[in-house]
Amino acid sequence: MPLVTKPNLPRTDDFYAALLAAHEGLTEAETHALNARLILVLANHVGDLDTLTEAIDVARGTPAAAADDPTKT
């Protein structure tokens, strides 16, 4: 499954608001734990190691992956 790096999320503002609301009232440690759980839930949903590894590379800004990432242009 190829990693989708072009905008693909309808209602981005609604998603961002929901994400911020999920963190509301949490301590820094609780926020980090929530982010870790969310990442694991989404990784399980994706279910493909190659895609997940590519996503990690893009998120880290690895040069080869960053060349294909439109957020880096």
Image (cartoon, grey):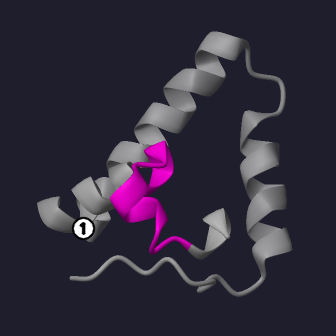
> Which amino acid type is marked by label 1?
Thr
Q: Position of residue 23 (x, y in %)?
A: 74, 35
Q: Position of residue 46 (x, y in %)?
A: 28, 68
> 36 left or right of 6?
left
Q: Which quadrant of the structure image shows residue 27?
A: top right
**Circle 1 SS class:** helix
Q: Position of residue 55 (x, y in %)?
A: 37, 59
**Image quadrant for the C terminus?**
bottom right
Residue drawn at the location 83% of the way across and 24% of the way down = 25
- Nearest the viewer among 3 and 70 is 70
Q: Is residue 16 magenta?
A: no
- Nearest the viewer among 3 and 38 is 3
- Nearest the viewer among 34 and 62 is 62
Residue drawn at the location 84% of the way across and 58% of the way down = 17
Above-or-below relation of 70 to 25: below
Q: Is residue 48 visible?
A: no
Q: Is residue 66 magenta?
A: yes
> 9 left or right of 23?
left
Q: Can residue 71 be seen in this view?
A: yes
Question: Bounds of the magenta span?
Answer: 58-69
**Image quadrant for the N terminus?**
bottom left
